[in-house]
Image (tube, rainbow, N blue to C red):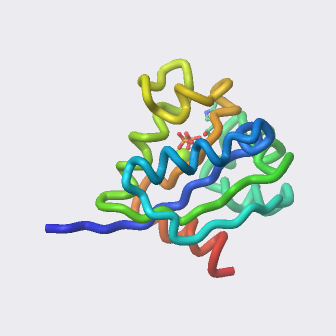
């Protein structure tokens, strides 16, 4: 049975700053994703805190929110069969050091905190995150 899903992808400040957004978008397209919605924006610290609220108890939460709001990001809704898992696979492990060959984070990630991309981790969060950026 087909299971076309939508997921939220963010090209984070470290990648936009290095002008990697075109190459990263090409990786999504060549892996069969459709970019349904897309915008380049800069968010404030408070918005970043809201977006990453699930991590509010983590020691890295404040730095993470400062970082996500530090420069322009590209936010996209991606669509594909099983898009949520497919995007997590294409992104690679959170720490680029552990990411497999051919993944976005292996190719472009600098460190665990500057790992170039975000992707939703569940159907529930994909809906919340897409609404956060595109239906608000
Ligand atoms: P992912 O982005 O792979 O879903 P998480 O949801 O666990 O990873 O974490 C969200 C983001 O927080 C990561 O992408 C990364 O930028 C940052 N992060 C995660 N763990 C750490 C850590 N130990 N130190 C610093 N930053 C971290
Ligand atoms: Mg996550």
Q: Where the C terminus falls, by quadrant?
A: bottom right
Q: Where is residue 81 in the image (x, y as percent from the top left)?
A: 30, 61
> Is residue 130 among the parts visible in the rendering?
yes
Q: Where the N terminus falls, by quadrant?
A: bottom left
Residue 93 placement, left or right of 9: left
Residue 132 placement, left or right of 7: right
Q: Where is residue 9 in the image (x, y as percent from the top left)?
A: 56, 55
Residue 32 placement, left or right of 65: left
Which image quadrant is residue 134 in? bottom right
Residue at 43% x, 23% y: name it. Answer: 101
> Is residue 125 among the parts visible in the rendering?
no
Q: Where is residue 12 in the image (x, y as percent from the top left)?
A: 70, 45
Which image quadrant is residue 15 in? top right
Considering every residue shown, the one lying at the far top of the view is 97
Residue at 80% x, 40% y: name it. Answer: 17
Residue 32 placement, left or right of 73: left
Residue at 76% x, 56% y: name it. Answer: 48
In the foreground, 119 or 107? 107
In the foreground, 62 or 20? 20
On screen, 72 above or below 16? below
């Amino acid at each position: 049975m087909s299971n076309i899903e939508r997921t939220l992808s963010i090209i984070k400040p470290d990648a936009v700053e290095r002008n990697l957004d075109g190459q990263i978008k090409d990786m999504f397209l060549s892996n069969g994703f459709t970019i349904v919605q897309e915008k380049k924006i800069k968010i404030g610290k408070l918005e970043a805190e809201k977006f990453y609220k699930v991590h509010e108890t983590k020691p890295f939460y404040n730095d993470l929110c400062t970082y996500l709001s530090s420069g322009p990001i590209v936010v996209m809704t991606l669509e594909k069969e099983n898009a949520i898992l497919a995007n997590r696979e294409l992104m690679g492990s959170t720490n680029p050091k552990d990411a497999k060959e051919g993944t976005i984070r292996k190719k472009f990630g600098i460190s665990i905190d500057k790992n170039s991309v975000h992707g939703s981790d569940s159907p529930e969060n994909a809906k919340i995150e897409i609404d956060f950026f595109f239906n608000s």
